[in-house]
Image (tube, rainbow, N blue to C red):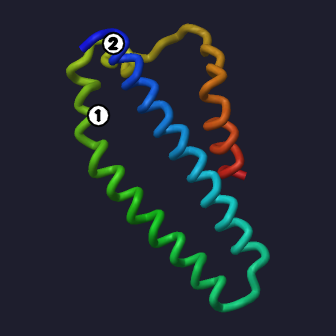
Amino acid sequence: MTPQDDKTRDLAVLQLLTRLVRETDRIVRLADDIDNYAETEQAKKAFNLIGDEVENVLKVIEKSIAPLYGLYELDPGLKLLNKPNKAKPKPIPSNKIVTAEIISRQEQ
């Protein structure tokens, strides 16, 4: 595999993760709107449907990704992450700020 192929694959993965974050944000906003403003029984049922579907998606993601955590034992660079690092924290890269903003909105 050429370095260009690696970059293309990495970009595709980042684009998929960005899409996942964007769609998650949309679902959270929709569920929040339903929870706060919906008055009909049908809308309240939609809220429960969203919860059920998100739970199913999370189970699939967890089942699919769980084996990848074995990389922490296999990869020397990832092993270092498990050791506490006393160095000062690094700033959040600009491509991860969107994720941090969504997480902070969800925590509120």
Answer left or right for 102 relative to 5: right
**Kind of residue indicated by mark 1:** Tyr
What numbered label is drawn on residue 78?
A: none
Q: Check the image and name the residue furthest to the bottom.
A: 41
Count of residue discs:
2
Q: Residues within 10 Å of mark 2 (few under 14, many from 20)?
A: few
Callout 1: SS: helix
Q: Position of residue 31 (x, y in %)?
A: 65, 67
Q: Nearer the viewer, residue 92 or 79?
A: 92
Q: Residue at x 64, y 56 (%)?
A: 26
Q: Position of residue 99 (x, y in %)?
A: 61, 37
Q: Position of residue 91 (x, y in %)?
A: 65, 16
Callout 2: SS: helix
Instruction: Examine the image and state in which quarter residue 48 appears.
Output: bottom right
Q: Residues within 10 Å of mark 1 (few under 14, many from 20)?
A: few
**Kind of residue indicated by mark 2:** Gly
Disc 2: which residue: 77
Which of marks 2 and 1 precedes in the sequence?
A: 1
Q: Residue at x 34, y 17 (%)?
A: 6
How far apart in space, not on screen, are marks 1 and 2 (Cα)? 13 Å
What numbered label is drawn on residue 69?
A: 1
Instruction: Examine the image and state in which quarter residue 84 appears.
Output: top left
Q: Check the image and name the residue furthest to the right.
A: 37
